[in-house]
Amino acid sequence: MLEYVLLMVPVAFLVASVYFAYKNVALGKRTRKSALVRQIASFAIVGSVCLITSMVAMAAGDGSAAASPDLNKGISMVAAALATGISGIGGGIAVGGAAPAAIGATSEDPKAFGKALIFVALGEGVALYGLLVSILIISNAG
């Protein structure tokens, strides 16, 4: 039971930070950019605390954490998650910029649809490459 409570603490912290950031932006106390920076900072803090806590707990277990396959597998899972997450964010930013431009170009000239669609697909390809890299990391972790 204690494990579930300890797992819920970081989740509750992140949900509360999102809620308070939304309320501050809605009330006009903060700008969207400062709320985004605070969200990224809180995510980085929670992620680093969770990673460091698990490494310290593993090292305190039997003293052989450096050669432990569980630690190596855990770190490879974190690497796979980062590869997928960061490439997904990059792909979203690319598609977010290319898709409105493609819609505008298509509305002006319907013949430009094929060319515009290629640029949108290139942005989505970034996310797919990140997913493939994470699959390779996971398959070689065992």
Image: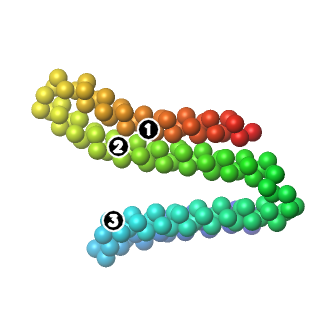
Which of 15 and 121 lies nearest the eye of the viewer?
121
Q: Which mark is residue 33?
A: 3
* Secondary element at tag 2: helix
111 to 69, vertically: above or below: above
- Relative height, residue 11 to residue 141 (above, below): below
The residue singled out by tag 2 in the image is 94
Secondary structure at badge 3 equals helix
**Residue 23 sits in quarter:** bottom left
Relative horizontal placement of residue 72, taking residue 17 as reference (left or right): right
Quarter of the image with the C terminus in it = top right
Q: Taking the image as drawn, is residue 18 in sight?
A: no
Residue lying at 51% horizontally and 39% vertically, measured from the top left? 130
In the figure, is residue 31 to the left or right of 49?
left
Cα gap from disc 1 to disc 3, whole angstroms: 25 Å
Question: Which label is found at residue 126?
Answer: 1
- Mark found first going from the N terminus, 3 or 2: 3
For badge 2, the amino acid type reads: Ala
Disc 2 to disc 1, C-alpha distance: 9 Å
Q: Residue at x 30, y 69 (%)?
A: 31
Per the model, the C-alpha gap separating discs 3 and 2 is: 19 Å
C-beta proximity under 8 Å, tags 3 and 2:
no
